[in-house]
Image (cartoon, rainbow, N blue to C red):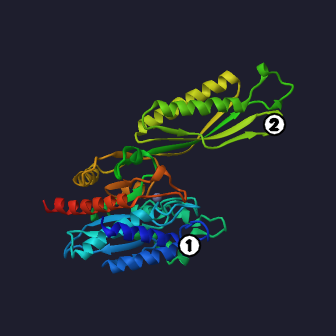
Amino acid sequence: MSDRATVLMARIDELAKFSEEPHRLVRRSLTPALQQANDLVASWMLAAGMTVRQDAVGNLVGTYAGVAGASKTLILGSHLDSVRDAGKYDGPLGVLAALACVERLHEEGQRLPFAVEVISFVDEEGLRFRTSYLGSSALAGSFNPSWLDYQDEQGVVLADALRRFGGDPADIASCRRNSDDLLGYCEVHIEQGPVLEAEDLPVGVVDGIAGQDRLTVEFTGVAGHAGTVPMARRHDALCAAAELVLAVERTGQATDGLVATMGQIAAEPGASNVIPGHVTLSLDVRHRDDAVRTRAVAALHDEATAIAQRRGVHLVWTSMQSTPAVPCSPQLIGRLAHAIEELGFKVQHLTSGAGHDAVPMASLTDAAMLFVRCKGGISHNPAESVRLDDVNVSLETLYRFVLGMQRDMAL
Ligand SMILES: [Zn+2]
């Protein structure tokens, strides 16, 4: 077992101490807690022979120069911001795995025919300003300037928080990268799902990030007295909703790889002796194939319409957000798979149901992700847990992946 994995795990514990709250991990974007985490990572980057800077949007960027004349850059990275009451691996694992890879190159005195950048993106989770991918979208050129006016719960405006963090809201455009200068982007991340554990594998290759539809569904019936309106004369909005909830579950179960969830429900007027007259539900549908997802949403709309007609209630079906699936680069998938095979493990392909910085990065350059088994598939929870030997495999895989890139360039 390499002690690089042991060092990484100790660093994860060190970073976990930087929190906005004393008894749980909360590290929102552009806060002093994130600054402390970035400063510590920056000191490790410098020790690994990298030059370090913070760009205008607040990303921490460490660069390990290539051989003289090397013109292209491979970006590795993830994020150090967190959700509320977070686990300590979601994000930091990817930043520290990238750093460990460069440390190994540095110790071995290796210079590659390309530069390797390690980036800690400034805001992946979107906890503070309710917009995710701030840092990576600035690189991809998709940063929306209106985001600078967003406020956090305390009324702090994003642009002001960014200035305090040492960034420059007027210069976000300088973060933008040119695709021609890049070889690709690779991110190591905990799986946040149960597949690798079930397959008893340390790591897996992500084929793509699922597309997602978010909708609001409303049923309007007739509120009435729970004691006096006979069952046959009711237009109960909550009963219509209940039928739809189960239809959503059936639809998800019937299609391979499809996940469909109604996570929020509000019944009005919300009294024990009143028939519910109005119900609002959320619907979240995800799949790696946009056509499958779109068909599922259309079928559910038909189902909801039929339920509403049968029950004499009114349906309002509103799309809130629809994001297409993001395929990972077949070339980079192949390189990761090759590295995993070399290490003697079966190559498990996975779809990421959660979003990552790889989403905006894929619009800029070839993107790939390596997932690491996590205990019980649990994430966004202090119970997040990752095994030392799995981290070791992920470090070895990433290192071989980077060297494989060098081999291919030499051909
Ligand atoms: Zn993450």
**Residue 204 horizontal/vertical position (percent):** 34, 50
Look at label 1 and name its amino acid.
Answer: Thr
The residue sitting at 61% across, 24% down in the picture is 306
Q: Is residue 351 visible?
A: no
**Mark number displayed over residue 288:** none
Label 1 residue near ligand 1, CB within 8 Å: no
- Taking the view exactly as shown, the residue that stands out farthest to the top is 232
Residue drawn at x 38%, y 55% as measured from the top left: 372
Relative horizontal placement of residue 120, taking residue 334 as reference (left or right):
right
Left or right of 159? Residue 240 is: right
398 and 129: which one is in front? 398
Q: Which residue is mark 1?
A: 31
Counting residues from the N terminus, which is met first, the one under dot 2 or under dot 1?
Answer: 1
Observer-nearest residue: 74 or 203?
Answer: 203
Element carrying mark 2: loop
Q: Residues within 10 Å of mark 2 (few under 14, many from 20)?
A: few
Crowd tier of the residue under label 1, counting other residues whose Cα lies within 10 Å: few below 14, some 14–19, many 20 or above: some
Q: Indicate which label's residue lies in the foreground, 2 or 1.
A: 2
Quadrant for the C terminus in the image: bottom left
What residue does disc 2 label? 272
